[in-house]
Every structure is written in C-alpha cells, then in structure tokens.
Image: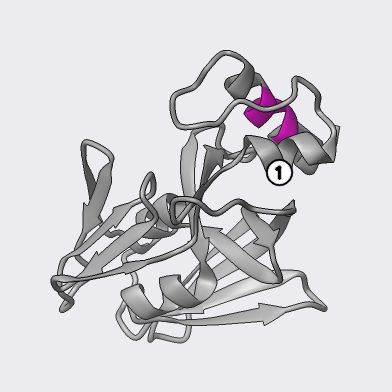
Amino acid sequence: MTARRRFATTLVALAAIGAPWLPAGPASAEEPALASALTSGPPGTSTSSVKTTVVGMTLRGVKPFDRLVIPDFDILQTNGNRLLPILRTLRFMGIEARSSGPKLSFAPESSTPIALDPDKGLLEVGGAVREVETVSGISDVTGESEIYIPESVVAEILGVGIDWNPDLYEITIRSSRPLDV
C-alpha cells in the first residue's frame, strides 16, 4: 500500500468515526475522499487536492559535519505548495513545543514567541496574527498527529533556509545555529 493511500485511508477512517478535527467525508480510500477528509485552514477554505510524498530530509547546521539525515520525511503537496510537518521539524531542531488547548506554541532561539492555531488557520508571531494554510492529519511515517504548514512559513518562523532538490527527492533545511545531534 502506498504512503498516499495509507494516509487517505487513515484520514477517511478518522472522519468516519467522527474525529472532531476532521469534517465528515465519504467512507472510501479513494483520492477524492482524501481531499474531503482533510482539515485545512484558514476557516472556510478547503484543500482541492493533496498528494502525500515521502522524501529525504537533511538538517544542516553551521559546522561542516553538523547534520541530521532523515530518510523518511513525509510532506504534503497541495495547490502547488509543499507543506512540511511542523511538529517533526521542531523536534529535529531541538525546539520545544507546548500545546495549550488547540494552540501550539514555541520559541526558536533568539526569536519572538510563536503560536499556531491549526483549527483556525492562524499564526501569531510577536503579537501579529495572520492566516496561514494548515492541514492536520496522521503521519504515515510516525503514526502520530501532525500539523503541516507551507515550507515558506517554516523557513520564515524558524529563520532557516529550505532547498528542494528534485533529483535527489530531498529537502535540505539550513540552520545558522549549531545543531545538538
């Protein structure tokens, strides 16, 4: 079974049992059911088509051998954008995230506190609130709940560079701080 189909099956099954953060959708593992079973923000928007892809990911620090390689990193592709799993990315970077109700909050080193409300599709950075595309679901790789946000937002809020290499099918996240790996 492909990762995409497993992701679709998991989301459709969760929607069928009434998971509160997933809208009801058809009880089928077909791709249209995947799009209808995803929770997407900001409110009132929907994701027309979603493609789950497992890629390689390399996290690079400032030192030459300061890196962490993750061979199985699941991303979503929707509306021409790549969405990265923010919880896994924070964990790999050693940034502690706290949840308070529906909100996820964290503070990268030398950065203002950040709060993400995936249910409402809102991102708060230093008191300024804006809408951001979010997709919540169960990761095929970890089997845990995950929140996916656009890679441009990940780069901005974490202060990192993100490169996509289509030849290697790999994402590289470049951090300007030493990694504790």
In the image, residue 120 sits, relative to residue 28, either above or below, namely below
Residue for point 47% across, 86% down: 64
CA neighbours of label 1 inside 10 A, class few (<14), some (14 to 19), many (20+): many
Residue tagged 1? 35
Toward which corner of the image does residue 35 lie, by quadrant? top right
Q: Where does the magenta region start and end? A: 8-12
**Depth check: 178 or 145 in front?**
145
- Res. 164 visible in picture: yes
Question: From this viewpoint, which residue is outermost toward the front?
Answer: 44
In the image, residue 42 sits, relative to residue 103, either above or below, namely below
In the image, residue 144 sits, relative to residue 61, either above or below, namely above
Q: Quadrant of the N terminus?
A: top right
Q: Where is residue 66 in the image (x, y as percent from the top left)?
A: 43, 76
> What secondary structure prevails in the magenta region?
helix
User: At label 1, which amino acid type do we have?
Assistant: Ala
Q: Quadrant of the C terminus?
A: bottom left
**Depth check: 60 or 160 in front?**
160
Helix, strand or loop for disc 1? helix
**Depth check: 11 or 16 in front?**
16
**Depth check: 180 or 6 in front?**
6
Q: Where is residue 99 in the image (x, y as percent from the top left)?
A: 23, 42
